Image (tube, rainbow, N blue to C red):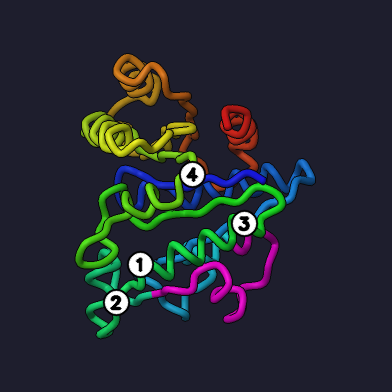
Amino acid sequence: MTAYFVTSTGTDIGKTFVTAGLIRHLREAHAQVDALKPVVSGFDIATAAVSDPGVLLEALDEPITPEALDRISPWRFSAPLSPDMAAARERRAVPYDEVVSFCTKAIAKNKGTLFIEGVGGVMVPLDENRTVLDWMVALDLPVIVVTGTYLGTISHTLTALEVLKRAGVRVAALVLNDSGDGAVPIAETRRTVARFAPQIPLAEIRRVKSYVAARAEFAKLASLL
């Protein structure tokens, strides 16, 4: 059994793209794999196919049904806000203890590789008192951190890594997911981040529209885990 928590330095950085790519890589190798996105905000059932849970289900080759959505993403909220704020809009709250228990049970039952994808970045609030960081600490899993290559990403990345280090969270790999704006070459970003975090395995994923175009890069990322 192997399980990883996938987090990032912020929202819309590429957690789901990276998680889906790793799923596809492992499925091509005929390995057993599953994924969860327990908490998701900005969810609209009308566009479920392109939502984060929908993308993960497609990578798992599962139909996007209400039952499948409930299985991998039980806590779904409509507003594209942090989970605490999105839940409050619906007069609900994220049941933190239930979320942790849901993940713990899935980890115990897992017989292959399990990816648990977080929501937003490392410090996104889940409820009035807990953040995604608390969630990661509670699960005590190795973490895959996804970051971008936009201008400013180095500070965001090193800050996230420092927060994780102080919390005792082990980073299994840092993924530089090309932001596509061309502001900073990915090689330069990699060299700088590596200089300040030499102990963390680094991988790069180019800006592509499909898994097939980045198959070799996902294979390299998987070899680091």
Viewer-side label of 3, 2: 3
Q: Quadrant of the C terminus?
A: top right
Query: How far, Cα to Cα, is label 2 from label 4?
Result: 25 Å
First reached walking from the N terminus: tag 2 or tag 4: 2
Q: Position of residue 196 (x, y in %)?
A: 29, 18
Q: Compare residues 44 and 180 and report the one nearer the observer.
A: 44
Magenta-tinted stretch: 57-76
Q: Quadrant of residue 211?
A: top right
Query: How far, Cα to Cα, is label 3 from label 1?
Result: 19 Å
Return the residue at label 3.
108
Which kind of residue does numbered mark 4 sit on? Leu
Checking the image for residue 93, the label placed there is 2
**63 relative position to 40: left or right:** right
Return the residue at label 4.
141
Query: How far, Cα to Cα, is label 4 from label 1?
Result: 17 Å
- Looking at the rendered structure, the secondary structure element under dot 1 is helix
**Residue situated furthest right in the rendering:** 30
Q: Compare residues 40 and 131 and report the one nearer the observer.
A: 131
**154 relative position to 220: left or right:** left
First reached walking from the N terminus: tag 3 or tag 4: 3
Q: Label 3 crowding class (10 Å Cα cut-off): few <14, some 14-19, many 20+? A: few
